[in-house]
Image: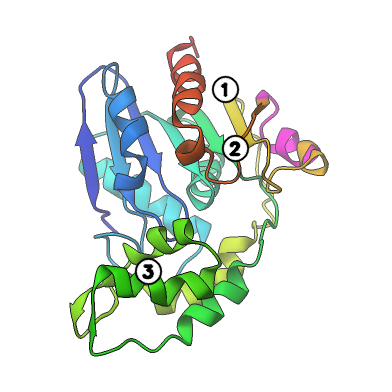
Amino acid sequence: MKLHVIERGEGPETVVFLHGLFGRARNLGFLQRGAAADFRTLALDLRNHGNSPHGPVSYALMAQDVLETLDDLGVERFAVVGHSMGGKVGMMLALAAPERVTKLLVADIAPARTGHGHGEMIARLGALTFPSVLERREGLDLLEPVVGNRAVAELLLQNIRLGEAPGWSIGFDDLARDIHAIENWPNLQIAPYEGPVLFLRGGESPYVRPEHHDQIRALFPHALIRTLPGAGHWLHAEQPRPFLREMMEFLRAPA
């Protein structure tokens, strides 16, 4: 499956940005613009998100989508920056195609089951009834009671077609059907990835915990695990400049 791509910058090395569940390529625009000063950067809409096609969901399928898209762009080797679900796609890429992935930065996710209520939230979202006409403010008012806060409602609203005959613009049914695969992590019998890896977790987030460290290092023996203080799961949005500093230091360091 060929994915929608936002490209910025030029350089001898390429960095690929992968968003999380219900996100899209442009959500990582601040980081992408920062990296574009030194690198060719490609931000992708993963399947069922943004302007990319829809279909069944698994991490193997999503990693294959990324490889097919990069093949089409003539990109052989690349670094990956992935948040949450995009971080799991990045891990799958590094493990399945280690000869192509030069570096991997995983933002606030572990190679483990890390569901924190997404299944229940998707069930509530699936039960929503859209009015015949929906504008932005009314959309936020519709979503906020379901998801619990305005910031998450803002994120989700980008996935809804506003105006007349509103509805989901993303592959919502595919995501809802396969949410357990998204929250989970496959049981892989695979060689570890020996390249440089940075796991950057939010200090206030429950997604990467001490009990995950052994699982991380079993698959990524050279992984660094660092904490971004004062950030939750959306650490790149909550602490964008500290995240950018960590990211650029990692990307610029010799492999």
Q: Amino acid at mark 2?
A: Ala
Mark 1 packing: few (<14 Cα in 10 Å), some, or many (20+)? Answer: many
Q: Is residue 202 left or right of residue 59?
A: right
Mark 3 packing: few (<14 Cα in 10 Å), some, or many (20+)? Answer: many
Q: CA distance from mark 1 to mark 2?
A: 23 Å
Q: In this view of the protein, can residue 198 be seen by the observer?
A: yes
- The magenta segment is 214-223
Q: In this view of the protein, can residue 177 be seen by the observer?
A: no
Of circles 1 and 2, which is in front?
2
What residue sits right under mark 3 in the picture?
140
Asked if disc 2 and disc 3 are in contact, CB closer than 8 Å, the reply is: no
What residue sits right under mark 1 in the picture?
196
Q: Is residue 163 above or below residue 194?
A: below
Q: Residue at x 68, y 41 (%)?
A: 204
Q: CA distance from mark 3 to mark 1?
A: 40 Å
Q: Is residue 7 above or below residue 154?
A: above
Of circles 2 and 3, which is in front?
3
Tag of residue 231: 2
Mark 2 packing: few (<14 Cα in 10 Å), some, or many (20+)? Answer: many
Q: Residue at x 21, y 31 (%)?
A: 8
Q: CA distance from mark 2 to mark 3?
A: 24 Å
Q: Element under label 2?
A: loop
Q: Nearer the viewer, residue 154 or 70?
A: 154
Residue 180 coordinates in the image, percent (x, y): 61, 70
Does the magenta stretch mainly form a helix, a strand or a loop?
Answer: helix
Q: Residue at x 51, y 57 (%)?
A: 59
Q: Element under label 1?
A: loop
In the rendered image, residue 218 lying in the magenta stretch gets the answer yes
Q: Amino acid at mark 1?
A: Pro
